[in-house]
């Protein structure tokens, strides 16, 4: 089965510490899976180890047909599909893409508590086009990108000169074009 982008994204709840295993098994079954990971250093006894840990522990994201979800639900480690009123809740492609871009290009990545506020859009740099909220942590500005359904967020360092309010026109950014069309 090839990856298709016409299927919606869903959040899957998985057993603790089964995120990587479940993501691997789902991709082996042919599903498009996204498991955002963050690299961190841990000290064990007398040696330091670098680990890739899930940014959203207990969750991963998968594209599939909600009417044919049995192969997903029978995968080892998968507890269920995150649902609202017993209906699997879709996650907008924009939220997944924003998190994916922050994970791929973000500096000093870290999970954050869910925040809401004035939306901004990055106009320059590797995170160009990403929308989120700016917060100030330890005298450094960070863009916070959220998965609203899970009420979880991830942040990366950013320079304020690279941003503008999400509703602002691109002309304010020196006339550059974001090239991604309407959001």
Image: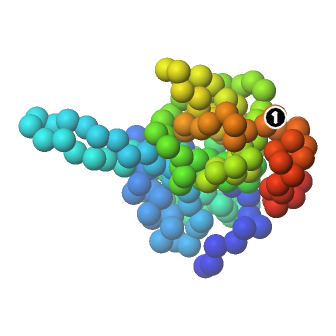
Q: Nearer the viewer, residue 130 or 15?
A: 130
Residue, far front = 174
Q: Residue at (48%, 71%) from the top-left corner?
A: 28
Within 10 Å of disc 1 (Cα), the crowding (few <14, some 14-19, many 20+) is some
Residue, far bottom = 1
Count the marks.
1
Residue 102, relative to residue 136: is it above or below?
below
Q: Residue at (87%, 41%) from the top-left corner?
A: 172
In this view of the protein, can residue 94 be seen by the observer? yes
In this view of the protein, can residue 88 be seen by the observer? no
Q: What x and y, as percent, mark residue 36? A: 51, 50
Examine the image and state in which quarter residue 143 appears. Answer: top right
Residue 29, relative to residue 13: is it above or below?
below
Q: What x and y, as percent, mark residue 141? A: 59, 29
- Secondary structure beneath label 1: strand
Q: Is the image coloured rainbow, by chain, by secondary structure, or in one colour?
A: rainbow
Q: Nearer the viewer, residue 182 or 164?
A: 164
Q: Which residue is mark 1?
A: 165
Q: What x and y, as percent, mark residue 107? A: 50, 43
Q: Residue at (53%, 21%) from the top-left corner?
A: 139
Describe residue 23's horizontal placement relative to residue 118 as left or right: left
Q: Quadrant of the N terminus?
A: bottom right
Q: Residue at (61%, 53%) from the top-left corner?
A: 126
Describe residue 87's horizontal placement relative to residue 141 as left or right: right
Q: What x and y, as percent, mark residue 10? A: 66, 51
Residue 128, relative to residue 139: is it above or below?
below
């Amino acid at each position: 089965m090839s990856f298709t982008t016409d299927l919606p994204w869903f959040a899957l709840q998985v057993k603790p510490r089964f995120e990587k295993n479940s993501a691997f098994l789902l991709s082996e079954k042919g599903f498009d899976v996204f498991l955002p990971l963050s690299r961190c250093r841990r000290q064990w006894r007398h040696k330091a180890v670098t680990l890739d840990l899930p940014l959203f522990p207990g969750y991963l994201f998968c594209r599939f047909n909600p009417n044919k979800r049995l192969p997903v639900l029978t995968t080892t480690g998968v507890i269920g599909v995150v649902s609202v009123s017993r209906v699997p809740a879709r996650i907008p492609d924009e939220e997944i893409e924003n998190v994916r871009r922050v994970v791929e290009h973000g500096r000093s990545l870290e999970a954050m508590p869910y925040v809401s506020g004035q939306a901004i859009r990055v106009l320059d740099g590797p995170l160009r086009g990403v929308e989120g909220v700016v917060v100030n942590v330890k005298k450094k500005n960070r863009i916070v990108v959220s998965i609203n359904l899970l009420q979880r967020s991830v942040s990366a360092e950013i320079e304020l000169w690279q941003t503008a309010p999400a509703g602002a026109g691109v002309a304010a950014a020196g006339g550059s074009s974001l090239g991604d069309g309407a959001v």
